[in-house]
Amino acid sequence: MAKEYNFSDVFKKVSSQTRKIYYRKHNEINLVPDVKGEMIKSLKLRNFIFFLCIVIAAVSTGVTIFFGVIAGGQQLAISSKKSTIDNLSEKLKSYSDLNDFLTIKDQLSNVSDITDNKKVLSRTFNVLSALLPTGADSIRISELNVDLSAEAPIFAFDAQANAGAPPYIDYNVLDSFKKSMKYMRYDYGNYVDKYGATIPAYCMIETNSEGAFFYEPITRDIYAYWNITGDGCNPSTSTEQDNDIISPDTDVETETQDEPANIIDGYATEDYNGTPVVRVWRTPQFSSWYKENPSDKEPSIDLSGAISNVPHFESSCVSYSGEIEESTNTVKWSSSNNSCLLVPDGDNGIVISESSNGRDASDELVLRFSATIALAPEVYNFNNKHMLALAPSGRYNVTDSYVQIQAMFGQRAKDCAKDDAACKGGN
């Protein structure tokens, strides 16, 4: 059994001096550490802040030195480059042909702008072939001025109208000529191969040696010749073109391995002045191209006018469409051209400044008049390829040629003589 101690008895036995010492020490232990603890914490915080300031000062000094090195290096690099530039500048200025070079460079930078603003004046005769009526009622020009400087090309001309039958002087000819302006159209676009790739304009032959368009005499449909063997003229086999131009399921090289002499790259050719050419129709061949269920390889045109698997002309103005007539089970084809107006203001686009009776070089009675016509700007734009003016009937004037252009012009008619009663009295 453990022995029990009575602590009160023990403390009583301790001397009073000893208890004094105990209590003194006990009080020092309980009171002094609180003050010293606060002081120690303050000292630690002071030391930490001091250490942190030293670290920050060291980092700032390092960053300053780092950026100073960079700034100094950049300055040295700039000075070196400036010296190099100054040396090259002095060397460049020493070239004797510098001015010529800068002039050529400046001109080359303006080539695209020059091309965009380039006009093709030779299209005037094709426009005249559509504007001027032919047949019994004829109009011949004695003087013509074409102004291409304005935004809209202007025809200013003196002409003479001949009714072709007595009394010859007939204002209905002039009135009909004026009212026909709203029916004038033009057409332009690109020739494409059977894969849809654009054929360069210089590869197409559109007129013969007399300037007349190639056309089928019976249907009056026109076509052009594609010089398929010309340099860069076959876009779907040129290495300069993207490969995706070629139809994915067509192997051009395979097609050309065992082809006859008149077959080139899968196209039937014919000879034109010793050159193998491919005939490309400008007007669709509806009867031979339309099929209800065409194969993937044969030429076709659908009812919306989309053409495939045959080289053809893609017009920027004329659209075609077909409609099946249930009574005859045939397709009725139609064309429309509502946007490409040769004279945008219609009959208001022609201004007759004066008119009078007169006699032409054959001494026939004619109606003399002066007029100006404002044409569509796109007609003379160089970037609009294969431009063609359309007569009021909607058909192409395929018989135009350099020889027939002479018939558009004639000697200026004379004023009525004082004693010429027939001339002065003509209605």
Image (tube, helix red, strand yellow):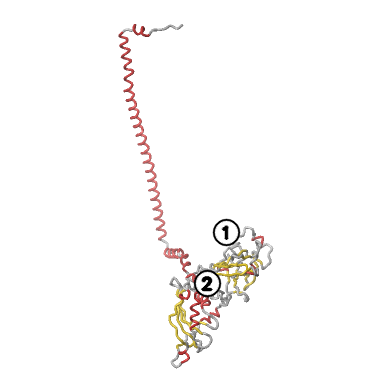
Foreground pick, 58 / 403: 403
Residue bearing the label numbered 2:
186
Say which residue appears at 65% left-offset and 65% top-offset: 291
Residue 388 in view: yes
Tell which circle, 2 or 1, labels the residue nearer the N-terminal end. Answer: 2
Say which residue appears at 50% left-offset and 79% top-offset: 177
Residue 289 quadrant? bottom right
Q: Callout 2: 10 Å neighbours few (<14), some, many (20+)?
A: many
The image position of residue 416, as x and y in percent, is 45, 89
In this view, 47 is above or below 148 = above
Three-letter amino acid code of the residue under disc 1:
Asp
The image position of residue 189, as x and y in percent, is 54, 67
Three-letter amino acid code of the residue under disc 2:
Tyr
Residue 193 quadrant? bottom right
Q: Secondary structure at mark 2?
A: strand
* Mark drawn on residue 242: 1
The image position of residue 244, as x and y in percent, is 59, 58
